[in-house]
Amino acid sequence: MSSQRIELVIRQLVVAGALLVLLVPAARGSSEWFGWLPLWFVGMPLAAWWSLRRCPLPHVALQLPRRRRAQALRRGDVRRAHRLPRAA
């Protein structure tokens, strides 16, 4: 099965799941076995579609400035610093 065919099937699952959640009140609830149903009907197909597209970042996230943080410095050998002096 080609990548385009898989993407088409996943897109159809996302649309069908969204319609199911919007139109069927029971699909908005929770199941004892599966948990929160909108996650499985909409969220998981969206995550599969996103990963099929190789996880692109939103354009807004690419335009945000990166924060500069101070990097942790390595200390010397910690084991030597805590060693007790040897008796002569």
Image (spheres, grey):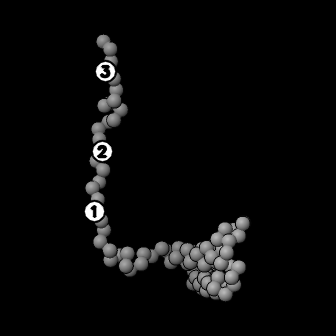
Question: In the rendered image, is residue 35 in sight?
Answer: yes
Q: Give amino acid for label 3.
A: Pro
Query: Which residue matches tag 2?
Result: 74
Q: Residue at x 37, y 75 (%)?
A: 61
Q: Give amino acid for label 1.
A: Arg
In this rendering, the answer to whether 25 lies above or below 79 is below
Query: Which residue matches tag 1?
Result: 68
The foreground one among 1 and 84 is: 84
Question: In the rendered image, is residue 12 in sight?
Answer: no
Would you call the spot at circle 2 few (<14 residues within 10 Å), some (14-19), or many (20 or more)? few
The percent coordinates of residue 86 (x first, y second) are 33, 18
Q: Give amino acid for label 2.
A: Arg
Would you call the spot at circle 1 few (<14 residues within 10 Å), some (14-19), or many (20 or more)? few
Picture quarter with the C terminus: top left
Q: Give SS at disc 2.
A: loop
Label 1 and label 3: CA atoms lie apart by 41 Å
In this rendering, the answer to whether 37 lies above or below 82 is below
The percent coordinates of residue 27 (x first, y second) are 68, 79
Residue placed furthest toward the top: 88
Is 41 left or right of 68, judged from the image as shown?
A: right
Return the mark for residue 85. Answer: 3
Would you call the spot at circle 3 few (<14 residues within 10 Å), some (14-19), or many (20 or more)? few
Q: Residue at x 42, y 75 (%)?
A: 57
Q: Give SS at disc 1.
A: loop
Label 2 and label 3: CA atoms lie apart by 24 Å
For residue 2, which quarter of the picture?
A: bottom right
